[in-house]
Amino acid sequence: MLFAVGLFAEENTPINQPDPQEIVRSVASTYQRDIDAAADYTFQQRSITREFDKNGNVTKTRTRTYETVFLFGEQYRKLIAIDDKPLNKSDLKREEKRLNTFFNKRNEISDEDRAKKKESTEQTFMREIGDELPYILNYEIIGEEMIDGQPVWVIQATPKNNYKPKSRTGKMFSKLSGKVWVTKDDYTWVKLEADFAEDFSVGGFLFKIRKGSRIEIESTLINDEVWLPRRSSINGNVRALWSVTRPHAETIYSRYEKFVSDAKITYPGNFPDQE
């Protein structure tokens, strides 16, 4: 799951301080580049979801591992393990059937129609982040650090009251308050730690992410050419209908490989083998 960052200059910005507005323009451009570059890589996603009771005790844990590739210009995730164990025959057969159905449907689409096909929901979500975050929050450079040997700016982000989001993604991110890290060399967003500064509702009263829920995102430099996700997590306080849960969802990304035309989705013989 990659995020863009926008910065706005304050009136009394020091002379030796970089112009935040110039930084955000470069960050937004780099972010869009990384979204496109991700289509050149296969990778694995290991997602762990935990639910807690009101006392902080774990009530449920679920782990799913996927092999992810881009096929016919679309991101395709194939389930390869449940709770760190290879799929049983029934699950394996179901996943193979789902993959065959995907291939058959895409093969029936002409190149012209395929070019017109809209991006996936996840890709649209990422594009909307890049389009709106440069303008949706107030930003201030508060420090400098090193990440993966790269010098970065540490930037504080807070909600902007007078901005009207243009998308559902924008509405969600307008509620965030936290910090982002941007590389000095290539203006790439590489880390985010943010809390919801207020409640965010989805579908009216049906689903609500409550104030204080926390999002963390980390990226890593792959092949010295592109920053791609390394870890993402959300530690939430969620109300669905009339029940309240406190889920913690974490995804670890690994095994990035440059995609080749004859790449195949396979099941590892021994699992897990996390890097």
Image (cartoon, rainbow, N blue to C red):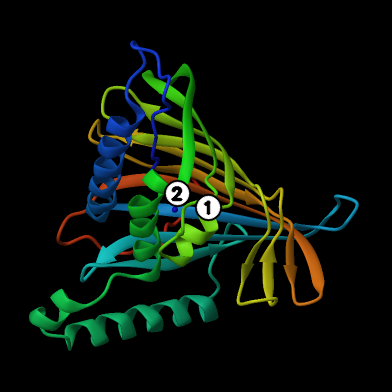
Disc 2 marks a residue whose amino acid type is Ile
- For label 1, the SS is loop
Task: Judge by depth and name the residue closer to the eye, 93 or 235.
Answer: 235
Cα–Cα span, label 1 and label 2:
6 Å
> Residue tagged by mark 2?
136
Q: Is residue 181 visible?
A: yes
- For label 2, the SS is helix
Answer whether labels 1 and 2 touch (C-beta < 8 Å). Answer: yes
Pointer 1: residues within 10 angstroms few (<14), some, or many (20+)?
A: many
What residue lies at 23% left-to-right and 46% top-to-bottom? Answer: 33
Residue 183: image quadrant is top left
Residue 57 in percent (x, y) is at 86, 52
Q: Is residue 275 visible?
A: no
Residue 38 in percent (x, y) is at 28, 51
Q: Which mark is residue 174?
A: 1
Pointer 2: residues within 10 angstroms few (<14), some, or many (20+)?
A: many
